[in-house]
Image: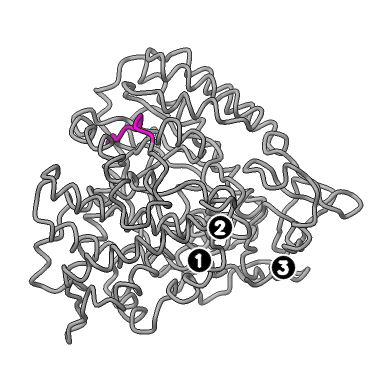
């Protein structure tokens, strides 16, 4: 893996003495005549308003909603700092509104849907470690650094006055901000009529002050009946592409769709049976998935921070804590309104251009919903700890863990669909799920090489191509070969589960290097989709105004 390039001093200033100081462009960054290109960049996103039926909320819940949105909104500033540095220092030096807007979407000067390519003059490539580490730090220096907290999810690595490395806890770096968030969550907890939600908000408020999130994760798992929900805190590690250690701040404010959730609640019970049937040697499936998991559908009414940057999440599988997962399982949250936005505005237009005409009837929202849902459920399958004493899969595979885990969830999600369809537990033509899955690969590949989901989809596309799971017609459309896709799905599942169980970092690196790439032929197809003005992802109109509540 290449080392981080040290950005030239004219591009970036980084202070060893002041933790709050971050990268700063030193000159105006927009060149006249590039607005057309920037408008094309903005056209990669289509706007969608996040709304929901607020009549399902009680009076107290409607009072809580603005407090939760306000707390969630504070994740934006924290993630900006983690991803780039000081937001205002960047925006103040950008002349035109289009570039500023694109920087807001990307939480920095790097295009997340184009391999993190810089779109701001005088700022070079994005450091693999984002702003979690000193930009001039090498992997060797980090590995030689003796500090038990250096690989914590919740610490920054900085330099002291002598120039050597030190750790700073998130709650120390953001002391003022986390106190504000904690206060808002406690204020909301006083209005909570649901005891589970009340307990979670109180524990989460405390966790922001000491970076100890496990108790609140357990409390979140115990919540079963609440309609209003919030996911908030430093959670995913995608942004740290140097080691995959550091968690990024994000938040979702959610309203549960009780009717849809009732339809989904039965599926978690099948996890132990499906685990036993995985297409891999017995040694790689000895762990028993937690059966206290639940599976529900929500309207999301606010995104903030990591989950709102670049490609937007449409389903959630949390917590990530392996101890919580083994004891309790996970909660799988399907973000139904955001999912519908991507299906209508992106997936259907893609299918109309890229899928064989005879198979387009198999592109359905129910199949898209199921494939996405079982992707999240499938995170609970497989193995969390290596079979050879290398520790957790996540720690063994480091920065490559996220891409492989997303690939596992995708391919085992399809495995679950097929197994449950055989049992008669899900309806519809199995071809609906497989064809929609194929179209979904084209949707997700467009997220680019900088995304864990994008890498996972490129690996799967190239593997399926090798196994003739699809063919390309003379008119440029793709036709699914259903039997061969079934075989390819099983073979790729075996490969991924084995790599995870062995903690085989070099093997994963080889898989990513060989198959996590976009071929010239595929790039032409993706360019065609862009030329047809098919957006890559969505941006949201959201908040109190979108919900028609008073600001």
Mark 2 lies on a secondary structure that is: helix
Distance from the alpha carbon under mark 2 to that under mark 1: 8 Å
Residue at the spot of label 1:
508
Q: Position of residue 267 (x, y in %)?
A: 24, 37
Q: Where is residue 75 in the image (x, y as percent from the top left)?
A: 54, 39
Nearer-N-terminus badge (2/1): 2
Closest to the observer: 547 or 264? 264
The part of the image, by quadrant, that contains residue 434 is: bottom left
Distance from the alpha carbon under mark 3 to that under mark 1: 34 Å
Magenta span? 290-297
Residue at the spot of label 2:
397
Q: Which residue lies at the image location 12% right of the left edge and 66% below the top edge? A: 360
Q: How crowded is mark 1: few (under 14 residues within 10 Å), some or many (20 or more)?
A: many
Q: Do the residues labelled 2 and 1 touch (CB within 8 Å)?
A: yes
Q: Where is residue 397 in the image (x, y as percent from the top left)?
A: 56, 57
Mark 1 lies on a secondary structure that is: helix
Residue at the spot of label 3:
11
């Amino acid at each position: 893996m290449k080392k981080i390039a040290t950005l030239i001093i004219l591009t970036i200033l980084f202070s060893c003495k002041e933790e709050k100081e971050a990268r700063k462009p030193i000159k105006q960054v927009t060149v006249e005549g590039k607005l057309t290109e920037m408008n094309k960049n903005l056209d990669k996103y289509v706007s969608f308003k996040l709304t929901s039926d607020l009549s399902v909320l009680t009076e107290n819940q409607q009072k809580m909603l603005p407090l939760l949105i306000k707390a969630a909104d504070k994740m934006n500033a924290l993630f900006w700092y983690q991803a780039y540095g000081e937001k205002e220092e960047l925006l103040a030096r950008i002349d035109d509104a289009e570039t500023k807007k694109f920087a807001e979407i990307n939480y920095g000067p790097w295009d997340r849907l184009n391999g993190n390519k810089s779109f701001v003059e005088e700022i070079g490539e994005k450091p693999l470690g984002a702003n979690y580490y000193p930009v001039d730090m090498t992997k060797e220096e980090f590995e030689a650094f003796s500090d038990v907290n250096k690989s914590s999810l919740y610490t920054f690595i900085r330099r002291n006055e002598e120039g050597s490395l030190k750790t700073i806890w998130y709650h120390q770096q953001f002391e003022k901000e986390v106190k504000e968030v904690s206060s808002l969550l406690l204020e909301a907890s006083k209005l909570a009529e649901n005891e589970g939600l009340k307990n979670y908000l109180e524990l989460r408020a405390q966790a922001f002050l000491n970076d100890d999130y496990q108790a609140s994760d357990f409390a979140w798992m115990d919540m079963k009946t609440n309609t209003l929900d919030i996911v908030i805190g430093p959670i995913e590690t995608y942004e740290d592409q140097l080691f995959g250690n550091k968690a990024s701040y994000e938040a979702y404010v959610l309203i549960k769709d009780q009717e849809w959730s009732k339809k989904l609640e039965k599926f978690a019970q099948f996890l132990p049976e499906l685990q036993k049937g995985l297409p891999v040697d017995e040694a790689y499936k000895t762990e028993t998935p937690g059966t206290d998991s639940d599976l529900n559908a929500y309207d999301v009414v606010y995104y903030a921070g990591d989950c709102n940057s670049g490609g937007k999440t449409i389903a959630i599988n949390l917590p990530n804590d392996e101890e919580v997962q083994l004891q309790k399982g996970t909660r799988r949250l399907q973000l139904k309104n955001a999912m519908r936005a991507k299906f209508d505005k992106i997936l259907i237009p893609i299918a109309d251009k890229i899928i064989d005409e005879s198979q387009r009837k198999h592109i359905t929202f129910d199949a898209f919903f199921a494939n996405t849902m079982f992707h999240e459920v499938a995170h609970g399958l497989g193995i969390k700890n290596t079979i050879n004493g290398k520790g957790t899969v996540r720690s063994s595979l480091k920065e490559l863990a996220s891409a492989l885990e997303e690939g596992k969830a995708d391919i085992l999600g399809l495995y679950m669909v097929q197994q449950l369809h055989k049992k008669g537990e899900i309806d519809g033509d199995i071809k609906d799920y497989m064809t929609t899955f194929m179209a979904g690969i084209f949707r997700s590949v467009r997220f680019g090489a900088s995304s864990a989901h994008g890498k996972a989809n490129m690996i799967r596309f190239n593997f399926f191509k090798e196994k003739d799971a699809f063919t390309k017609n003379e008119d440029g459309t793709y036709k699914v070969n259903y039997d061969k896709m079934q075989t390819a799905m099983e073979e790729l599942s075996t490969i991924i589960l084995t790599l995870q169980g062995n903690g085989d970092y070099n093997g994963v690196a080889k898989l990513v290097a060989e198959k996590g790439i976009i071929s010239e032929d595929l790039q032409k197809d993706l360019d065609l989709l862009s030329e047809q003005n098919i957006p890559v992802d969505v941006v949201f109109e959201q908040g109190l105004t979108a919900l028609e509540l008073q600001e």
